[in-house]
Image (cartoon, rainbow, N blue to C red):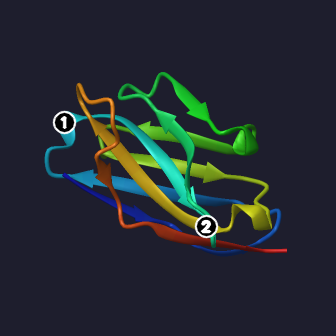
Amino acid sequence: VQLVESGGGSVQAGDSLTLSCASSGRASEIGTMAWFRRAPGKGRIFVGAITRGGDSTGYEDSVKGRFTISRDNTKNTIYLQMNSLNAEDTAIYYCAAKLLGSTQYTLWGQGTQVTVSS
């Protein structure tokens, strides 16, 4: 299974941006999917996740109310809608997935850069 992110770029503070993560290969074996990010000089942190059926999501506190994760299983794709972006959102954003029955995120994309200028 491969995960490929897209949609990153450079925006101004207050703008919106939507990231996509498409899975290929054994996509039917994928369960919960998530977004993580790594800011310059910092470790990778959890941003949010969505269950296989898309019926439940969870978010890190700093993005609650601003970021929304959605999922289209017909396209094997998840999305991260980011609103009211600020400079602290500048990071490389990674898509991750758990295989069904696994408790760990073992599948990772290559990352996409998001840069927010204030």
Label 2 environment density (alpha carbons within 10 Å; few <14, some 14–19, many ≥20): many
- Is residue 66 something that shows in the picture? no
Which mark is nearer the camera, 2 or 1?
Answer: 2
The residue shown at (47%, 33%) is 50
Name the quadrant containing residue 28: top left
Residue 77 coordinates in the image, percent (x, y):
36, 48
Mark 1 belongs to which amino acid?
Ser
- Is residue 22 something that shows in the picture? yes
Mark 2 belongs to which amino acid?
Ala
Q: Which residue is mark 2?
A: 91
Name the quadrant containing residue 73: top left
Report the disc number at residue 11: none
Q: Secondary structure at mark 1?
A: helix
Q: Which residue is mark 1?
A: 28
Name the quadrant containing residue 4: bottom left
Residue 40 coordinates in the image, percent (x, y):
63, 72
The residue shown at (56%, 40%) is 48
Which of the two residues, 83 or 114, is positioned nearer the viewer here? 114
**Quadrant of the image containing the C terminus:** bottom right
Distance, label 2 to label 1, CA atoms, is: 29 Å
The residue shown at (38%, 25%) is 53
Q: Is residue 116 left or right of residue 29?
A: right
Residue 22 coordinates in the image, percent (x, y):
33, 54
24 w.r.t. 91: above or below: above
Label 1 environment density (alpha carbons within 10 Å; few <14, some 14–19, many ≥20): some
